[in-house]
Amino acid sequence: MSKVVLITGGSSGIGKAIGEHLASQGYIVYGTSRNPDRIQKTDFKFNLLKLDVTDPENAVSCISEVIEREGHIDVLVNNAGVGITGPVEETPDTEIRKAFDTNFYGPINLMKAVLPHMRKQRSGLIINITSIAGYMGLPYRGVYCATKGALALVAESMQMELYRMGIEICNLAPGDFNTNIASGRYHAPILEASDYGENYARVMNVINEQMQDSSDPALIGKKVQRIIESKNKKLHYKAGAFMEKVSVKLKQLLPDKVFNKLLLNHYKL
């Protein structure tokens, strides 16, 4: 029996790459989008369902639709997310809440919706797409780092809560991948009169340069397949450039001042 996979934020970027790869490997794949009717369906190898991850009732109805069509759901990939940059002091509270609504509460909404079904079938896998940025505080990306770090910690707790129920959960943290996340990212404006202005502009230049040399999101699709088919799953996985993955180890090993100095040099601060 083919495994049934639901991928949130499956209309573009990493989500679409995961869906296309899994569909090509024989999985039954459903992606989600807030506005699937606006998308050219001929470009997709899998079904697209309407979903706003910030709406708990919509999360329940989306999961129910997959169950009604297929009879079961085996894998949930919590991929939907938004980017946000800016000095924390100058980032509007409404934008901070929006980021948490999508990146943190959104995945929780989907997990709460799918777990009753997975508990009933005594099996299931949840993969949360977090971020390398969730392992550390990066300058002018503090809110984004916080949303992804919070999601990773929730998964750590849930892994123990679900331990004896036949349900597995893990985090996959990508580094920089060539997606359109920047186009939908909220950028706090760079204010010339601000004490943060010059450094914020410098950091944004570095981030944009990194995105130009970032990896192909198709690699994430292959990584997700390996996780699904692994018999001994880990809690944390990472994907990205060598130095991105090494930075997580350096964060653990180096004194805070030394690690922060490395980040300051990297971002030309």
Image: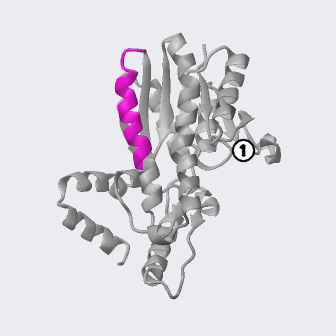
One can see residue 174 in this view: no
Residue 1 percent coordinates (x, y): 60, 13
Q: Magenta segment, which residues?
A: 149-165
Quarter of the rendering containing residue 218: top right
Mark 1 nearby-residue class (10 Å; few <14, some 14–19, many ≥20): some
Front residue (pair 58, 70): 58
Q: Is residue 175 left or right of residue 255?
A: right
Q: Is residue 79 magenta?
A: no
Chief SS of the magenta region: helix
The C terminus sits in image quarter: bottom left
Residue 135 percent coordinates (x, y): 35, 51
Query: What amino acid type should be assigned to the residue bearing mark 1?
Result: Arg
Mark 1 sits on what residue? 34
Using the image, determine if residue 4 lies above or below residue 253: above
Secondary structure beneath label 1: loop
Q: At x 48% / y 12%, what residue is drawn?
A: 122
